[in-house]
Amino acid sequence: MKNSSTHSNQETGRKSFGYHLILDLYECNQATIGDINTCYCFLDTIPDSMATHKQSRPFVVFTKGLGFAGWVPIVESGVSLYTNIPLSFASVDIYSCKKFDAEKIKELTLTTFEPKRIKEHYITRGDRYIHPVRLLNERRLT
């Protein structure tokens, strides 16, 4: 018997609810991850690069010498960025209900923060999600 948690979208015929790109960036350029203008600009431009829609300007908090935390809400979900200057580390989480070009966004991120090493994950979310209209139609058939 196959474990139901391993069913792919192709097996179930369902569309994923969301797409999540997670990037851990090690040994980044400290001047870049410590620059609020660079970090703000990154958050401000990523939604356009994803062909998504910003709901507001990015929210940012900067602690001098320590790092930056920021988030930009998009209609399709959100993008967050956290930097740690002393550790030369940054983490980026991009979640969207609209599929986006993960490789393009990854390259933009790497170009911006110049890490020497990265750890990445790209996962689909809500693989068992059924759109409400489809759910009603499926329930009518049973």
Image (cartoon, grey):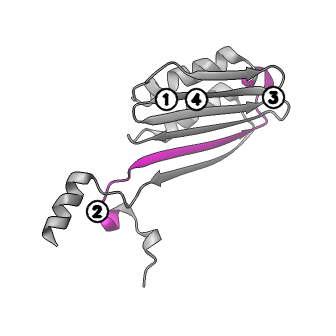
Rounded to the nearest angstrom, the CA distance separating label 3 from label 4 is: 18 Å
Q: Amino acid at mark 2?
A: Gly
Q: Viewer-nearest of labels 3 and 4? A: 4
User: Which span of residues is magenta-colored?
Assistant: 10-33
Residue hosting label 2: 13
Judging from the image, what secondary structure is the residue with disc 2 in?
A: loop
Q: Is residue 6 above or below residue 95?
A: below
Q: Viewer-nearest of labels 1 and 2? A: 1
Residue 73's disc number: 1
Residue at 21% across, 56% down: 134
| 10 Å crowding of disc 1: few (<14), some (14-19), many (20+) | some
Q: Earlier in the sequence, mark 2 or mark 4?
A: 2
Spot occupied by residue 123 in the image (x, y as percentages of width and height): 51, 52
Q: Amino acid at mark 1?
A: Pro
Spot occupied by residue 124 in the image (x, y as percentages of width and height): 46, 53
Labelled pair 1, 4 in contact (Cβ < 8 Å) = yes
| 10 Å crowding of disc 4: few (<14), some (14-19), many (20+) | many
Residue hosting label 3: 85
Q: Amino acid at mark 4?
A: Trp
The residue most toward the top is: 37
Residue hosting label 4: 71
Q: Is residue 23 located in the magenta-colored stretch of the structure?
A: yes
